[in-house]
Amino acid sequence: MTAITYTDVTKRFKGANMNAVDHVSFSVEAGEMVMLVGTSGSGKTTLMKMMNRLYTADSGTVSLFGEDIAKKDPVALRLSIGYVIQQIGLFPHMTVYDNIATVPKLLKWNKEKIAARVEELLKLVNLDPKEFYRRYPAQLSGGQQQRIGLARALAADPAVMLLDEPFGAIDAINRRNLQDELLRIHQKDQKTYLFVTHDITEAVKLGSRLLIMHEGKVQQYDTPEEILKHPANEFVASLMEGVT
Amino acid sequence: MITYWEKYNHKLTGPLLQHLHIVGITLLFSILLATLLTLLFLQHKSAAHTLIHLLGAVYSIPSLALFAILIPIMGIGERTAIVVLVLYNQFLLMRNFFAGFDGVNPAVVEAATGMGMKRFQVLVRIQLPLAFPAILAGIRLALISTVGIATIAATINAGGLGTILLDGLRTLNYVKIWWGVLLSAGLAIVANLILTAVQRVVEKKFYLNN
């Protein structure tokens, strides 16, 4: 089953002299973890933000499980997609519990169901519920914050997860641990993940396929092995040299 | 001074209550107006900054001059005084309200929107609570400033603690002047203490992280 389809999607920002995303088409099968890879300014984040309509495509269509997202209510669409950003964006005035419960509360789940889900999620991201429920984001380390960010995005069991450089600001050791845990979680939940990163090593480690972006255009879209063996062009080849 | 209080305390409590009345109404209208303006200009940052500059210019006009400008239009009395005081407060309040909203991390707002909060929900559940300490600080400033400037309102027959001071000056009654000073300064100090305490409680409760 195809989860996500981008068809000839183009986006140009006001005042810019080139397209941020330039006639991009690709599709993602359900259960895949696709890494959007590229340097900054390559259009990878813009591409992702058109999925939950934080940005609107100028032309082309984006569909989710066969439905054109432009025809959906943006709020309902966003509630059905998990979203994690680099700066994490945990709500500093809310406890860990309330942060994770955000979307379930918006969806008006009852209290028992929310409590059970929050406990389950904290265990999933390897944090002791009793110890962390009542903490505020500032009382957590960067790695713990990002675990909560992940748990919060998974809260209402969305079929699709968007991760925008989630581990970008975390030290190497913690990043590796979080990557391993994400792989474990993905194996368990089999959700569809779109993951933006500029770290090619991270992309190769996590991705079932990599979508390599440069100057708004797709350079190559394939499995990590294929791309390592047969880079489509010089840009991809030089990017892959960074794999450690 | 104590005997003066024993003899004439109605001459002191009357103006004190009147003063509280002016301050209360001024603060109520000031906060309502500033809230409305903040909501209107929230999405228009550069217009908001221009507005705050303009309000800053108004704030720099001496109160006596502003009263004088308004008297031909609105006459003398409490109403004119309140209008002037509300106008002054807009600068103090808007500046702080906007600083509060500007201080909210854009990543937090983006996360909230991306997760599926409606604009109003983002405003009420995320932006407002995070801007609240700055909002409260603005209200505290406005309160202290109002208590002070309201004494000058006595010159346009608006009543309040300023009448004690003016009467005292006119009759060279030093005891009366001292009572006026004591009450107006005391009121400002007490109001400040109360709001500082409120601010601390709020910060402890919700923002121990900041």
Image (cartoon, coloured by chain):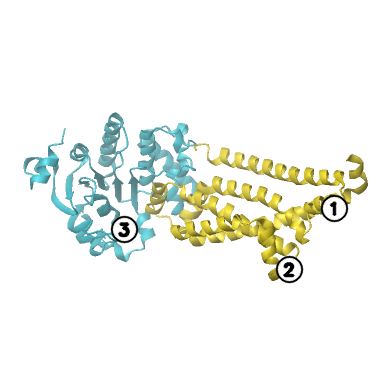
Chain colours: A cyan, B yellow
Q: Residue furthest bottom?
A: B73
- Identify the element where label 1 is drawn: helix
Front: mark 3 or 2: 2
Q: Amino acid at mark 1?
A: Arg
Front: mark 2 or 1: 1
- Which residue does the numbered mark 1 point to in the structure image? B170
Q: Is residue B89 above or below residue A229?
A: below
- Which residue does the numbered mark 3 point to in the structure image? A55
Splitting the image into 4 quarters, where does residue A166 fall? top left
Chain of the residue on which disc 1 is drawn: B
Labels 1 and 3 in the same subunit: no
Chain of the residue on which disc 3 is drawn: A
- Which residue does the numbered mark 2 point to in the structure image? B75
- Identify the element where label 2 is drawn: loop
Q: Position of residue A87 (x, y in %)?
A: 36, 42
Q: Position of residue B114 (x, y in %)?
A: 37, 53
Labels 3 and 2 in the same subunit: no
Q: Residue at x 29, y 33 (%)?
A: A175
Q: Residue furthest top?
A: A173
Q: Quadrant of the C terminus of chain A?
A: top left
Badge 2 local density, few (<14 within 10 Å), some, or many (20+)?
some
Q: Amino acid at mark 3?
A: Tyr
Q: Are marks 3 and 2 in contact (CB under 8 Å)?
A: no
Q: Nearer the viewer, residue A105 or A165?
A: A165
**Is B82 on the left or on the right of B52, as rendered?**
right
Rounded to the nearest whole Å, what is the CA distance between mark 1 and mark 3?
Answer: 69 Å
Front: mark 1 or 3: 1
Q: Is residue A100 above or below residue B43?
A: above
Q: Nearer the viewer, residue B82 or B34?
A: B82
